Image (cartoon, grey):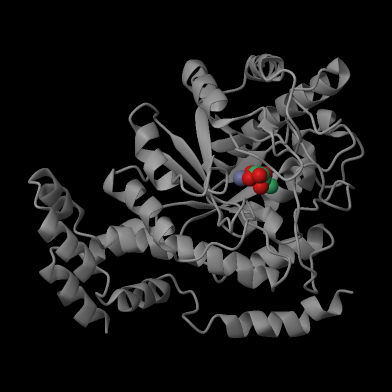
Amino acid sequence: MYDYAKKVYAEYGVDTEAALAKLKDIPVSIHCWQGDDVIGLDGGGTASGGIQTTGNYPGRARNFDELKADIKKAFSLMPGTKRLNLHASYAVGATVDRDKYEPKHFKAWVDFAKEIGLQGIDFNPTMFSHKNVKDGLTLSSPDEIIRKFWVEHCKACLKIAEYFATEMNSHCLVNIWIPDGFKDVPADRLTPRLRLKKSLDEILSCGYDKNKVIVAVESKVFGIGVESYTVGSNEFYQNYAAKNGICCLLDNGHYHPLEYVSDKIPALLAFYDRVALHVTRGVRWDSDHVVLLEDELKEIAKEIVRNDATEKVMIGLDYFDASINRLAAWIVGQRNMQKALLWALLQPNGKLKALQDESNFTELMVLQEELKTLPFEAVWAEYLNRQKVAGANWYGQIKEYEKTVLNHRS
Ligand code: RNT
Ligand code: ZN
């Protein structure tokens, strides 16, 4: 089957061997929070302050050991180069508050990441599910004690990120997302943004190692309960990032449904060395459904691949579904990201670009449509085989894990 597919793609000028060789090296940072419904290990017990999960599927990881076991099992069914995306709320055994977190609270994660052969660890300050999210505000709070607390938390996270980078010998992306906003028409839209700007200035001036740590800011259009105004909007963060030499993180659930992140990636690549992504699937809103192999996912992958930006675009996953088997959710999304990248790598991108430049739009359409029915599956199956990862029947292993492990958690 693969030999046949290889020939078919070759007729279109596509080298499947080159695609397979490239795919295995494109890192995908996998979020730890699909495993426990974003609850974390530092005591909150429930997700709050701008984060919501829905569903009650049995078997949620309730502690560090269960989460590790689930990650180990799920990651074993994911092909390619993997990184772990951690939130600060996953500190292990911390007895201090989040503003005082230290690398030692994350050593167990480093040991684990090394044990299962991950490329690196990425990190996120956790500015939700905590009592200091006051009136829905964190870094933009008018309460100086609150604002300072979160500034100190972010500074602590940058230190921890340096530690991850040193230990893993790979950069650490630190992504800043805050829930700050207002439910109804604000009286002042500027001052909260100026306070956020000041907070970011204070965080970035802590003297972190820029060779090891990459800082990103994640914007959002609105959230449940903050429908009228979001402090960390797209314009705010893009300008902040451009002026301060950090990068933007685009979460494809965070825009108007008719705005596309696939179109934003090349816009940012014209100005930035790096762009970070949270790949998710919003159904009518930022619902964080499992990533499916949809057209927009393929378009996102195409923008990364055909612009030769696989080292500039940092791909991370961000979804959480508590209504289905959580490991299956993880695996489906990660495999779909990889499938989309393979899809993009199997396009005759040079030829397609040339047709566009020649204004040969008829042939461009004809070719793009023909490409949709080439024997993609055979190349994907070959990839899984070479990666020594279960093929299309992987779900059997998860059903077994559910029976023997998950169902014993009550
Ligand atoms: C929330 C943001 C944010 C979170 C994670 C858990 O709308 O997308 O990235 O989902 O940090
Ligand atoms: Zn996100």
- At a point 56% along the width and 46% down the height, the residue shown is 120
Q: What is the quadrant of residue 374 in the picture?
A: bottom left
- At a point 83% along the width and 50% down the height, the residue shown is 41
Can residue 4 be seen here? yes
Nearest the viewer among 188 and 308 is 188
Q: Vertical placement of 215 versus 29: above or below?
A: above
Q: What is the quadrant of residue 36 in the picture?
A: bottom right
350 left or right of 242?
A: left
Q: Vertical placement of 192 versus 386: above or below?
A: above
Q: Vertical placement of 266 versus 339: above or below?
A: above
Nearest the viewer among 161 and 282 is 282
184 left or right of 239?
A: right
Where does the image place residue 298, in percent across and percent down from the top left? 38, 58
- At a point 75% along the width and 47% down the height, the residue shown is 51
Nearest the viewer among 91 and 343 is 343
119 left or right of 127?
A: left
Looking at the rendered image, the quarter that the N terminus falls into is: bottom left
Can residue 21 be seen here? no
| Quadrant field for ligand 2 | top right
Where does the image place residue 297, in percent across and percent down from the top left? 43, 57
Numbered circles on residues, count = 0
Looking at the rendered image, the quarter that the C terminus falls into is: bottom right
- At a point 66% along the width and 28% down the height, the residue shown is 158
Where does the image place residue 225, in percent across and percent down from the top left? 77, 42
234 left or right of 309?
A: right
Where does the image place residue 283, in percent across and percent down from the top left? 59, 59
Q: Residue furthest front?
A: 185
